[in-house]
Image: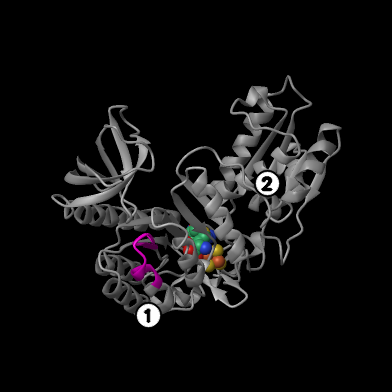
Amino acid sequence: MNLADTEIVLGILNKSGYSPTQAIDEADVVLLNTCSVREHAEEKIHQRLSVIRKRTSDKPELVVGVLGCMAERLRSNLMDRHNVDIVVGPDEYRKLPDLVDGALAGSQGIGVRLSRTETYDDIIPFRSEGISAWLSVMRGCDKFCTFCIVPFTRGRERSRTLISVVAEVEQLLEQGFREFTLLGQNVNSYMDNGRDFADLLSAVAGVDSKLRVRFTTSHPQDLSDKLIDSIASHDNLCKYIHLPVQSGSTRVLEAMNRTYTREHYLQLVRKIRARIPGVALSTDIISGFPTETENEHKETLSLMEEVRYDGAYMFKYSPREGTPAYRLGDDVPEEVKARRLGEIISLQQKVSGEVNQSLVGDSLEVMVDGPSKKSELQLSGRTDTNKTVVFQAGPYKPGDMVSVKIERATSATLFGKVGCSLN
Ligand code: SAH
Ligand code: SF4
């Protein structure tokens, strides 16, 4: 989400005559786009801000700004603590050119009002070249999970128009993009004049059969049958759903205000698997939510064994001031949280390894991304189930589709040989 927001910010600034540089020593303005979801993310930004100010101490005129959720949450405190020039929350990026101009002329500026309507619908994001594009289709969140700061830092839910999303995809396709990820804190809440997220997905999928469409994130409470049917019925809607469960215990889920039970979630998983054969599922899990008992933690492990996710993002609970859970205290000791998280991670690694191992011998359709991380002699790409596949380099360019026969697998990567080009 922040990557997509950064592209929107660059789009706004670019229109006002600013251009990006990769070298901080060349920069007149440094803007950090930030996340407040966990304490650790915020700590990294505090450190980064100290380093930037130290490293550029010979350049006092350098403008430093903080954007995103930390700006929204900490506001002018950031100016006091780090001598930051501008602080701009997620809904005020249109003010950036003025605020940057003001800061270059020596005045501090702040914009942290949340909006009920801002979607940056008309802004053309400044994207780096490639085949994959992020498109933010709705902003904000009204779910108020008790642990989560997002509804406070990103405000109320609102959606872009379907027509503007489709038009952007058409343009990007012409520019060579092939894979589109539709983004929102809860895409299932998407609504544009009676057209819901399933309608949006079908419209984007209908632009061209060659493009691939992904989306994230779906809340398990309102993932509709219509959405499942849309995914099942379009070949170019990727068979991959990120479906954060957070906990396997109904009691903890209730304390988290997730509004579904363990049984509802498992039932949903069964329904998805029955209607979309071969679908890959991933999840988010929090260990050590306040009051979580050892048995409730075991329920999370047993749910993971039952679902057998392809992948998971796993976190220790991090208390966020101002959220309802903050008032419950943080009563699971750090070492217990860490041990539980360790158990969750090793179970997931084992399952991911087994799931990937079961694909050895299969021929999978892979969209080529580019050279692999480890060697120029190898290419890497992804399956529609979002698995990374590494194979020997050949006459293929990013965006090409190839069939790869899988020869071996780790918990993170599949390795194979190209059987044929599918272009
Ligand atoms: N809107 C998305 C999630 C956004 S935050 C959704 O509902 O799926 C991404 C993930 O961060 C969440 O799914 C949750 O697992 C984790 N998270 C959010 N708040 C957290 C907190 N206070 N401590 C630890 N993890 C948290
Ligand atoms: Fe946070 Fe819950 Fe909204 Fe996701 S759905 S952003 S976890 S409040």
Q: Which is more toward the observer, 319 or 304?
A: 304
Q: Residue at 38% across / 39% down in the picture? A: 398
Q: Residue at x 28, y 27 (%)?
A: 377
Q: Is residue 36 above or below residue 138?
A: above
Q: Is residue 183 left or right of residue 111?
A: left
Q: Residues within 10 Å of mark 2 (few under 14, many from 20)?
A: many
Q: Which mark is residue 373?
A: none
The image shows residue 65, relative to residue 242, as above or below, that is: above
List the residue tagged with mark 2. 67
Q: Earlier in the sequence, mark 2 or mark 1?
A: 2
Provide residue 41's location: percent of width, then percent of height.
Answer: 55, 47
Q: Where is residue 114? Give x, y as percent.
A: 73, 61
Q: Could you say which is closer to the camera, residue 420 or residue 9?
A: 420
Q: Nearer the viewer, residue 285 or 366?
A: 366
Verify whether residue 237 appears in magenta. Answer: yes
CA gap, disc 2 and disc 1: 38 Å
In the image, 275: left or right of 283? Answer: left
Colouring used for the render: one colour
Q: Amino acid at mark 2?
A: Leu
Residues shaded magenta = 230-241
The answer to which quarter of the image holds residue 373 is: top left
* Residue at horizontal 58 percent and vertical 57 percent from the top: 167
- Mark 2 residue CB less than 8 A from any atom of ligand 1: no
Which quadrant would residue 309 be assigned to in this image?
A: bottom left
Q: Is residue 97 visible?
A: yes
Helix, strand or loop under label 2: strand
Residue 308 covered by magenta stretch:
no
Picture disc at residue 264: 1
